[in-house]
Image (cartoon, rainbow, N blue to C red):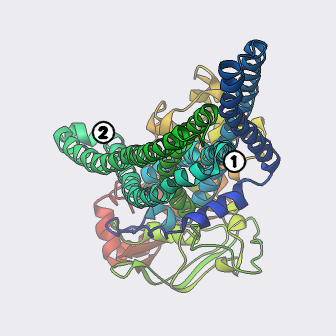
């Protein structure tokens, strides 16, 4: 059974990400993801301050070095000043190490926290919300966008702090040497800020589109690989290659635009800085010629000015990294902020049911969208301990009944009750804890066999897992595996046969021991001998329980207490097998075709 809408042409559109201002994003990062890291951050900032101060000290040493060694000829300073330089370099290296390690530690922890929140948010969405976003696009955001965010933190936000501190240190040295020349040098900052802002705006647009195309490309690749059997069977290699190449080319256009924009930042800054430096040197030279500026002051000032241009240069480049990271953060927060449409009502109570509980659909109506009706005024009742079968052509609404009972969607009209309790008034956790589901296409995870069975009840003992496997006729082939119950099943259970996967899924449902069973022809993939054992186990399991079966083969419906025949979202017939055959309606026609066990409900 595929628990997506019966009408598979119904499209769900993802909600666009709401734009957020850069400062709003930064404030949220500080508020939500630096909690518990303030001490570490303070130590890292301290290291930045020390590193920047040591850069300033190196520039400041030039003045006394020239004056005392080259002008005053103090030979004693040949040892003292080089030692001072070495001491400054050692302190700067230690501070730089601390700064880099702490900065990257903070960034990695924030990245991990963001990924945790993204996954928590997405996995808690309802089926409609999960269907709205392609899984590959989500993976792209989970990996690619968080990498951009991490880079923005390490090289951008915190990196910019380091460069600003270094620039301040150099400005202190410049002012100490000559404040008039410092003011002249500062004239380069406004045009640099203007250019950086323009480049940042352009880069954010192209980066955002590049991220979107990365998600689209990921979706294309995933679909091609997931559908590899159809691709090979229908000779679609050239077709999927053409689609992938188109996605790659479109993504490349935006990435190259971002590369060109990013590459323009440093040259533009260098050009303005070069002009300012040339003007400053000319003025300093004029002052020196006329005796208003000593050579040692000139040398120290020029050295500090040229060293100050490096952080200005870096700031323009780091701004582009920050811009890309903030654009990624905007998309990430869009994922984290997504809210499910299906949630517990205020004052919702746990579902309280006995071992066998009546399930009642009372005039239930539901639509997936305006053009895709799911159910139309459906009423049916399953009494405690009864087994009912749902039959009908594809798209009739059988799967929709399962979806609504599990509250994957909420109904548009009517009510669904279990033991007299409206399922909208009970907690989702308790509702689903009381239902065991076995689908026609078993879903296994890339874990061990024991772990897949234990998903039915996470606190089950090893012996309970084994007993459930035996009841599902799975113990023999499990123990024949190299690692027995600890054998890995592979992606989607591909290391096992279809029948083996189905028996593990049945064992999982048996372990759940829920009062309500939803079965989508749970034995359809089994061989005759295994089916006999499993049918016996299922018969025992269904005793005293409420069971609803989507039936595709005759053997399932013959022993049903009541059969509901569905067509186009309505119940068109109901009764026992004998009663329905006498009516010679849709059920009789389906019966003559063997009910077509391959119809997907």
Q: Give the CA separation, mark 1 to mark 2.
A: 34 Å
Give the vertical position of 295 relative to 240 (above or below). above
Give the vertical position of 280 relative to 361 (above or below). above
Residue 527 seen by the camera: no
- Residue 46 place in picture, x, y as percent: 78, 42
| In-image side of 536 versus 590 (left or right) | right
Sequence-first disc among 1 and 2: 2
The residue tagged 2 is 228
Element under label 2? helix
| In-image side of 3 versus 600 (left or right) | right
| In-image side of 502 versus 154 (left or right) | left
- Local crowd size for mark 2, using a 10 Å CA cut-off: few (<14), some (14–19), many (≥20): some
Q: Nearer the viewer, residue 438 or 127?
A: 127
- Residue 403 place in picture, x, y as percent: 52, 68
Question: Looking at the figure, which quarter contains the N terminus?
Answer: bottom left
Question: Looking at the figure, which quarter contains the C terminus?
Answer: bottom left
Task: Residue at the far front: name it.
Answer: 290
Residue 134 seen by the camera: yes
Q: Nearer the viewer, mark 1 or mark 2?
A: 2
Element under label 1? helix
Q: Nearer the viewer, residue 270 or 349?
A: 270
Give the vertical position of 445 relative to 355 (above or below). above
- Local crowd size for mark 1, using a 10 Å CA cut-off: few (<14), some (14–19), many (≥20): many
The residue tagged 1 is 511
Task: Residue at the far right: name it.
Answer: 39
- Residue 512 place in picture, x, y as percent: 69, 52
- Residue 432 place in picture, x, y as percent: 66, 63
Q: What residue do we see at 47% from left, 50% from top? A: 320
Q: What residue do we see at 55% from left, 57% from top? A: 329
Residue contact between numbered discs 1 and 2, judged by CB atoms under 8 Å:
no
């Amino acid at each position: 059974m595929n628990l997506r809408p019966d009408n598979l042409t119904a499209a769900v559109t993802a909600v666009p990400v709401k734009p957020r201002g850069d400062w709003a994003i930064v404030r949220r990062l500080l508020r939500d993801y630096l909690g518990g890291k303030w001490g570490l951050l303070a130590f890292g900032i301290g290291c930045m301050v020390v590193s920047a101060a040591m850069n300033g000290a190196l520039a400041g040493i030039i003045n006394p070095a020239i004056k005392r060694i080259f002008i005053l000829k103090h030979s004693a300073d040949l040892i003292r000043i080089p030692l001072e330089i070495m001491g400054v370099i050692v302190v700067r290296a230690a501070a730089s190490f601390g700064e880099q390690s702490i900065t990257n530690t903070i960034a990695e922890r924030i990245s991990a926290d963001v990924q945790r929140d993204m996954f928590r948010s997405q996995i808690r969405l309802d089926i409609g919300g999960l269907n709205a976003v392609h899984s590959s696009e989500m993976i792209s955001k989970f990996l690619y966008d968080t990498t951009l965010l991490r880079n923005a933190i390490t090289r951008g936000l915190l990196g910019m702090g380091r460069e600003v501190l270094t620039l301040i240190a150099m400005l202190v040295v410049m002012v100490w040497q000559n404040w008039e020349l410092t003011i002249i040098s500062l004239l380069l900052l406004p045009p640099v800020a203007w250019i950086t802002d323009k480049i940042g705006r352009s880069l954010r647009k192209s980066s955002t589109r590049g991220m979107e195309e990365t998600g689209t490309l990921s979706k294309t690749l995933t679909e091609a690989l997931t559908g590899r059997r159809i691709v090979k069977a229908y000779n679609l290699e050239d077709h999927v290659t053409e689609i992938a190449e188109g996605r790659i080319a479109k993504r490349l256009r935006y990435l190259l635009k971002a590369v060109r924009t990013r590459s323009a930042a440093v040259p533009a800054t260098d050009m303005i800085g070069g002009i300012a430096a040339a003007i400053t040197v000319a003025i300093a030279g004029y002052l020196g010629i006329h005796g208003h500026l000593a050579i040692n002051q000139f040398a120290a000032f020029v050295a500090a000015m040229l060293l100050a241009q490096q952080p200005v240069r870096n700031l323009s480049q780091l701004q582009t990294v920050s811009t890309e990271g903030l654009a990624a953060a905007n998309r990430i927060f869009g994922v984290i902020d997504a809210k499910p449409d299906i949630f517990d009502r205020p004052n919702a109570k746990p579902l309280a049911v006995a071992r066998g509980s009546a399930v009642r659909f009372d005039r239930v109506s539901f639509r997936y969208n305006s053009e895709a009706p799911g159910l139309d005024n459906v009423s049916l009742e399953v009494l405690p301990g009864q087994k009912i079968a749902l039959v009908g052509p594809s798209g009739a609404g059988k799967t929709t009944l399962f979806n609504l009972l599990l509250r994957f969607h909420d109904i548009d009209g009517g009510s669904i009750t279990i033991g007299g309790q409206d399922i909208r008034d009970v907690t989702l956790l308790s509702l689903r804890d009381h239902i065991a589901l076995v689908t026609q296409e078993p879903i296994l995870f890339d874990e061990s066999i024991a772990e897949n069975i234990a998903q039915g009840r996470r606190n089950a003992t090893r012996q309970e897992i084994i007993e459930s496997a035996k009841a599902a006729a799975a113990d023999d082939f499990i123990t024949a595996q190299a690692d027995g119950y600890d054998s890995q099943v592979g992606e989607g259970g591909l290391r096992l046969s279809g029948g083996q996967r189905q028996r593990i899924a049945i064992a999982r449902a048996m372990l759940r021991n829920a009062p309500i069973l939803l079965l989508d022809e749970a034995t359809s993939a089994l061989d005759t001998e295994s089916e006999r054992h499993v049918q016996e186990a299922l018969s025992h399991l269904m005793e005293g329980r409420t069971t609803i079966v989507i039936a595709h083969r005759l053997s399932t419906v013959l022993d049903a207490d009541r059969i509901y025949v569905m067509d186009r979202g309505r119940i068109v017939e109901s009764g026992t097998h004998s009663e329905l055959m006498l009516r010679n309606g849709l059920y009789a026609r389906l019966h003559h075709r063997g009910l077509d066990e391959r119809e997907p409900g």
